[in-house]
Amino acid sequence: MDHVSSLDPAVASRLKRDADGLVPAVVQDAGSRDVLMVGWMDDEALHRTLTTGRGTFWSRSRQAYWVKGETSGNTQAVREVRLDCDGDTLLLLVDQTGPACHTGDTTCFDADRLL
């Protein structure tokens, strides 16, 4: 992640990032309000999401950017991006096409109910 981001400095100044420069992004279906997934964003991923309207994240395992649905076709059209009161978590409200989870489940939270 050695690059200069084009993220608006007013937005960037409000973010509280972890040691790797990342902020968790909770992705929620704009219609059903189901929580679909959680991804990670740095300043550039947030900038790309805000400017393209497509959910763009930083893959911690691959060390690369990825756009949700780029290979699967299960895309996210981003309607809103919100920052929580502490500045340490983002909320994306999206129109999801197809399943959100890489397993084929509707959400990443379908399979394992603990309580």
Image (cartoon, grey):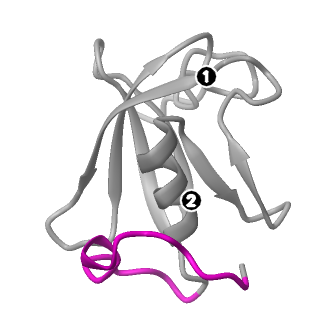
Q: Amino acid at mark 2?
A: Ala
Residue 43 visible in the displayed image: yes
Q: Which residue is found at the position 83% from the left and 27% from the top?
A: 71
Q: Residue 45 occupies which quadrant of the picture?
A: bottom right
- Check the picture and name the quadrant holding the N terminus: bottom right
Which SS does the magenta portion mostly show? Answer: loop
- Give the side of residue 44 with respect to residue 79, left or right: right
Neighbourhood count class around disc 1 (C-alpha, 10 Å): few under 14, some 14–19, many 20 upward: many
Image coordinates of residue 17 in percent, x first then y, are 44, 80
Residue 4, placed above or below residue 30: below
Q: Which residues are magenta?
A: 2-19
Picture quadrant of residue 85: bottom left
Which residue in the rendered view is the most extreme toward the bottom? 19
For mark 2, give the secondary structure. helix
- Indicate yes or no whether the magenta region holds residue 7: yes
Mark seen at residue 75: 1
Q: Quadrant of the C terminus?
A: top left
Q: Are marks 1 and 2 in contact (CB under 8 Å)?
A: no
Report how far apart the C-alphas of labels 1 and 2 lie in the structure. 16 Å
Q: Nearer the viewer, residue 82 or 112?
A: 82
Q: Where in the figure is residue 90, as x and y percent of width and height?
A: 34, 56
Identify the residue at image location x=56%, y=51%: 39
List x then y, in percent, for residue 42. Answer: 54, 69
Helix, strand or loop status at disc 1: loop
Instruction: Give residue 68's quadrant in the image.
Output: top right
- 95 vs 50: above or below: above
Count of numbered tags: 2
Q: Earlier in the sequence, mark 1 or mark 2?
A: 2
Residue that carries the numbered disc 2 in the rendered image: 45
Q: Is residue 56 left or right of residue 31?
A: right
